[in-house]
Image (cartoon, helix red, strand yellow):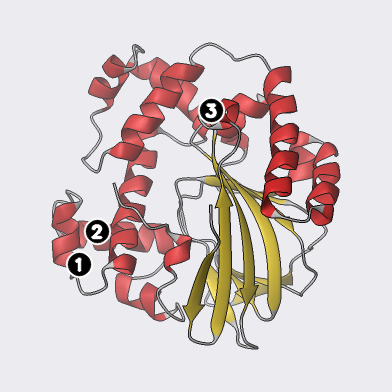
Amino acid sequence: MDPENINLGFVMMTITEQLPSVALRNYIRCYSLRELNTGGQDVPRLIHAIDQSFMTFWLSKTPLFSHTPSLFGTTETIQKVNLNERPLLGLQTSFKGHLNFNGVYRFFSVEFIANGFFRIFNIPFSHLSDRLLHTDDVVGVNARFLQEQLEESACMQEMAQAADQFFLKAFLKNLPKNNIENITAASWIIQQSSAPLNIGALASQVNLSIRGLERHFIEQVGISPKLLARVVRFNKALQCKMIYPERNWTDIANSYTYFDQMHLIKDFKTFTGHTPSSFLKQLPLPMRERFGKDIN
């Protein structure tokens, strides 16, 4: 895909996305290369509930700091991010603070689809949800060799080829387990819908019992089907507001089948730690790149 240049006033970002090889497209949505220049200003990137998981490779050494809210009181913990580690971010179901960017950054990310990580590495994703881990600790030291290849690559196409080789090797090594396709189908149904989830109907659609669906779903995706449905709906509502800021929250709540605006606000507080207005005020400008362009 052609690079997309985003000008957010003092912030410049270039995003280049590329699809993985055909064999991996049911498990990896895309590879992306982001090049960010904050113009010497602090730019926060809030970590709220998300319905995808990411593996990131830092390709620059500009200092980066994480701000994590305290469990007690109003203070927060500020920690320098170890750029020699390759963060693996599982599905998130609550607010985790923010990263503070200030300077010039370059990083390569892999966005997994639902149970994609489980299918490729055969590692239960229930261990990764609501956590930020070092990739090497989860999948092994070979991730370091992929980092070296990414750093030596001259273009996005070479980066994607190196990533394809890495993930295909793991994909072919780990034979698929039972119910992989059932959970892939269930995840896809949830991602395409904004309506409240009927767990019995979903289990019937993918030929599993309710108990079997929930057990395999948590193992492969990391959270329950009902919780994923809530996170998906919330992200679609948030994405809509980011792209169409003129729309009011009542209209958006109706569009995404919330019972009323208060139920949307309740999800907002659960998944971002803030009310809608408070959350949006913390962004320097609508960061539409964080949420994508299309709304289902």
In this view, 55 is above or below 251: above
Left or right of 84 on screen, residue 48: left
Q: Which residue is mark 1?
A: 249
Instruction: Tell me the residue at 35%/39% (across/down).
Output: 191
Q: Is residue 177 above or below residue 46?
A: above
Residue 248 place in picture, x, y as percent: 18, 70
Q: Which residue shows up at 81% across the image and 56% down it?
A: 151
- Identify which residue, 167 or 216, lies in the foreground: 167
Q: Nearer the viewer, residue 8 or 211?
A: 8
Which of the pair 139/271 is nearer the observer? 139
Q: Residue 264: give its label.
A: 2
As measured in the structure, the alpha-carbon distance from the residue carrying label 1 to the one carrying label 3 is 33 Å
Q: Which residue is drawn at the image coordinates 44% and 70% (left, top)?
A: 287
| Residue type highlighted by circle 2 | Leu
Mark 3 and mark 2 lie on one chain; the one further toward the N terminus is 3
Tag 1 and tag 2, C-beta contact below 8 Å: yes
- Provide residue 129's location: percent of width, then percent of height: 56, 42
Image position of 261 (left or right of 6): left
**Earlier sequence position, callout 1 versus callout 3:** 3
Residue 285 percent coordinates (x, y)? 42, 79
According to the picture, the residue beneath numbered tag 3 turns out to be 220
